[in-house]
Image: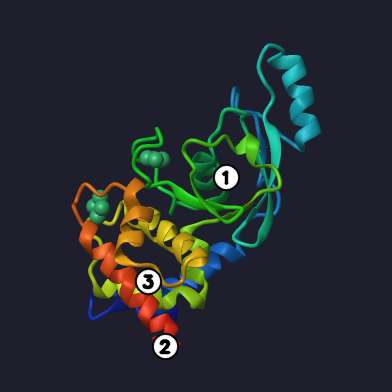
Amino acid sequence: MSRGDQVKQGGNMTLTHEAAQAISADKVASLPATPAQYRCPICGKICVNHEDLKFHYANEHPDAIVPIIVKLNVNGKDCEVLIEPHWTLQRTLQFQLGLTGAKQMCDSGACGSCTVIMDGRAVLSCTILAAECEGKVIETVEGIAANPKWKTLIDSYCRWDAMQCGYCTPGFLVTAKALLDKNPNPTEEECREALAGNICICGTYPRHSQAILEATMKMAEGGE
Ligand code: FES
Ligand code: FES
């Protein structure tokens, strides 16, 4: 059965966990190691490389700040990204690497929708400049979804229906994964505490702790 068959069944969209995992794995595998193009964000000119872009700035936009290259390790892959120095990590992941899981909602550090894991800690990618992330190891919800180790957690989220519109869900899931990395057997109180910075306007709050607690039990029993 092709992936397309798995996704479309009986005319309805049915995204199996396996299909979603494969899509995430493809996304991670196709992360670009270097910028796809060196485009001037001011006039649109395509330059051949970063040196050419700097030369172009010196001649055409001498008062503007030249875009920079930042090296990140994202979901296990080394990626060089070309960004303007004021870009946040969230914007960089979305627009330079095509990773849309870290959502921009409040864009001011108040909602948790943009949560990613950086050097082992859950952080808000809308509050961090990508320029500050040189050499950092970053994990996004796509990397978590691609890793079979976290299938049990994602399945529990689905079983407990811990989402309605789903916009906030990646942020919750990344926070939950960061919690379980540090504490594989949290109490309900600890789950609530860890998720306290994640806001859900659909009001799914109680279900997240239930999903995490169920997942920890199943993971301790060794699986599904
Ligand atoms: S979008 Fe980053 S905390 Fe809300
Ligand atoms: S499920 Fe809609 S914002 Fe949380």
The amino acid sitting under disc 3 is Ile
Q: Earlier in the sequence, mark 1 or mark 2?
A: 1
Helix, strand or loop under label 3: helix
Q: Dot 1, crowdedness within 10 Å: few (<14), some or many (≥20)?
A: some
Q: Is residue 204 above or below residue 136?
A: below
Residue matched to label 3: 154
Residue at the spot x=43%, y=54% of the render?
101
Helix, strand or loop under label 1: helix
Q: Earlier in the sequence, mark 3 or mark 1?
A: 1
User: Split into 4 quadrants, where in the image is the N terminus?
Assistant: bottom left
**Residue 36 place in picture, x, y as percent:** 66, 47
Asked if one can make out residue 123 in the rendered structure from this viewpoint, the answer is yes
Residue at the spot x=46%, y=68% of the render?
145
The amino acid sitting under disc 1 is Gln
**Residue 135 place in picture, x, y as percent:** 71, 47
Residue matched to label 1: 96
Helix, strand or loop under label 2: loop
The alpha-carbon separation of the residues under discs 3 and 1 comes to: 26 Å
Q: Dot 2, crowdedness within 10 Å: few (<14), some or many (≥20)?
A: few
Residue matched to label 2: 221
Residue at the spot x=23%, y=64% of the render?
207
The amino acid sitting under disc 2 is Glu
The alpha-carbon separation of the residues under discs 2 and 3 comes to: 16 Å
Q: Earlier in the sequence, mark 2 or mark 3?
A: 3
Q: Is residue 41 above or below residue 17?
A: above
